[in-house]
Amino acid sequence: MLNLAVVLENSAREMPGKTAVVFGDMRFSYAQINGAANQVANGLVAAGIQPGDKVALSCPNLPYFPIVYYGILKAGATVVPLNVLLKRREIAYHLADSDAKAYLCFQGTPELPMGEEGWAGFNEVDGCENFWMITADPAAPSPIEGTMTLGQLMGPQSPVFDTVQTDALDTAVILYTSGTTGMPKGAELSHSNIVMNAFVVRELFDPQEDDVQLITLPLFHSFGQTVQMNGGFLGGNTLVLIARFDPEAVFNAFEKENVTLFCGVPTMYWTLLHYPDADKFDLDKISRTMRLGVSGGAAMPVEVMKQFSQKYTVKILEGYGLSETSPVVSFSRMNMPHKPGSIGVPVWGIEMRVVDQDMNDVPQGEPGEIVIRGHAVMKGYYNKPEANEEAFRGGWFHTGDVATKDEDGYYYIVDRIKDMIIRGGFNVYPREIEEIMITHPAVSLVAVIGVPHDQYGQEIKAYVVLKEGQTAEPEELVAWAKANMAAYKYPRIVEIRETLPMTATGKILKRELR
C-alpha cells in the first residue's frame, strides 16, 4: 500500500514545527499544512468523493495548492492539476476527458479571471458534480453567487484524517500533455511513479537539512510539482512560493529567505541574468547562500549557463524528463564531470536508449529517438488505447525526442521528432492551436510552427490562408487567438498567405515553412 500524501505526512510527523511553506509574509509549519490537507480530505469525503474519483485543481503557486493537492490524495482520489491559463472551452475539455467528479478553482485576478473561466467551463460538463471556489481570503464569500468556497468546504472539518490506503499502482495524478495529433492527453501517474521520482530527485540534489527551495515554476506542471514540491516535502525542506515568475520577486526571495536551491526553465535564467536592477540586491550574499541551480523543460543555451554560473558562482545542472515520466529520467550528477549542453545520464532505475525507426540502437554520436523504460514511466494515457499502443511500441516508451549519446554515456537533446514547440518551458502543440484558429470566420487554412526566439527559445507563428472574400489583418487574428487560448499558446506572429505548400495528398509541408 502506498499513498503519495506520505511525503507530507512523514515530514509533518517528524518535524511538525518546521516551516514547510513561505508565501510573502505568511509562514506555515508542516503540521499546519498537513492539518489543512486533512480538513480538505474530510470535506471531500463528506461531499461524496470516493477513492479513485478524479478531482481537478486550478491554482497558482499559493499555499492552497499543496493543501488541496494532498487533501485530494488523502481522500484516495486522483488529482487532475490544470494549467491556470486555460480558458473556458479548454477547461471543459479537461474536466470531461478526465471524468472529473469535482473541481476546485482559484478565483484569480481581474487580469486572470480564473474563477470565471473555471465556473463557465464546469457548467459545460454534466459529469462534474461539485465546484468549489478557492478565494484569496479563506473567510470571504465566493465572487460568483451560488458557488461554494474552499473555506466552506474546510471550515467545519477536523484537522485529523485517516488517509485512505491506496495501492502503489493506483493513479495518483493525471497530468495533461499533448502530442501533435489530437487534443491533450492525460498521463496517468501512479503513487509509486511519483514517490520514486521524488526519492530519486532528492538524492540527485545532495540533500541538506536546511535546504530552502524557491518555487516559481508552476506547481500544476510536473517539474515544479514532483521535482520541487513532492521532493521538497519528502526532504523536509522549506518551500518559498512565488505565484508567478517575476525577477524582482525572485531576487528579493533569494536574499530575504536564504534560498539554497533554485529550479527553472532556461528563459528564467536568461531573464535573471539580464535583469537591469539585479545589482540593488546583495548578490554576494545570494551567491554564498545558493548552492545549486537546476534547469529543465528545454535545452539551456550553453552561453547562458556559463554567464549565469560565473555571475552568481552557482553550479547549474541540467536534467530531462516528460510529464509521462513523472518527470525526471536523466540528470547531470554532482559527482560526475559536468558537460554543458548535456542532459546527463539516466537516473537510478531508468533505462534509456537512442534508437532508429526499427528500434535498433544507433551508433555513438548519431541522432535517434530516446526510448525509456523503468519506474518513472506512466501507466498510460487515460482512456486512450490507440495512443498507448503507439507510445509503448516494443515495450519501451517513445518520447518523440531526438538525441545523441557520447562515449561517456551522456545524452544530448538534438531536436523534436514531432512538431511540438517549447515556448519558455511550456509545451505548445500546433494542431490544437490550428483547430481553434480555423474556427475564426475569416480563416480557411492555418499551419503553426515554432520560430527561434532569444528569450523564449521558440515563438509561435501561424501561417493563415483566408476564406475567399474575407479580410483580416494579422493583428486582428493575434488578438482573437489571445482571447480564445491560454497565454502561452496563442501565436504572437501571424503571416497571411494565398497558399500553403502541400504534398500531393494535401498534407501541409511544414518543413518548407520552416
Image: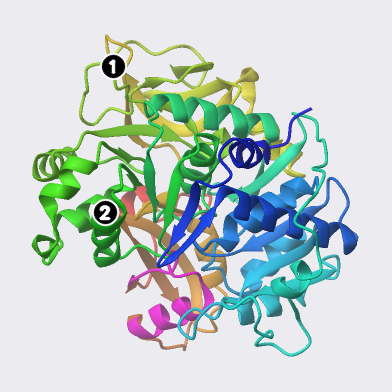
Quadrant (top left, top right, bottom left, bottom right) of the N terminus: top right
Location of residue 69 with respect to 290 vertically, above or below: below
State the residue at coordinates (28%, 27%): 342
Q: Which residues are magenta?
A: 475-493
Location of residue 201 with respect to 114 vertically, above or below: above
**Would residue 496 be found to the left or right of residue 469 on screen?**
left
State the residue at coordinates (74%, 90%): 145
- Circle 1: element type: loop
Q: Residue 313 is drawn in which quadrant?
A: top left
Crowding near pointer 1: few (<14 within 10 Å), some, many (20+)?
few
Q: In the rendered structure, find residue 335 and report the number of the disc placed on it.
A: 1
Towards the viewer: 454 or 144? 144
Colour pattern: rainbow
Q: Is residue 454 visible in this depiction of the protein?
A: no
Crowding near pointer 2: few (<14 within 10 Å), some, many (20+)?
many
* Amino acid of disc 2: Phe
Q: Residue beneath label 2, please?
A: 254
Towards the viewer: 474 or 344? 344
**Would residue 166 be found to the left or right of residue 249 on screen?**
right
User: Residue 221, percent across and down?
Assistant: 51, 51
User: Residue 65, percent across and down?
Assistant: 58, 59
Q: Is residue 476 magenta?
A: yes
State the residue at coordinates (47%, 89%): 469
Q: Is residue 64 visible in this depiction of the protein?
A: yes
- Circle 2: element type: helix
User: Residue 461, percent across and down?
Assistant: 35, 64
Q: Is residue 298 magenta?
A: no
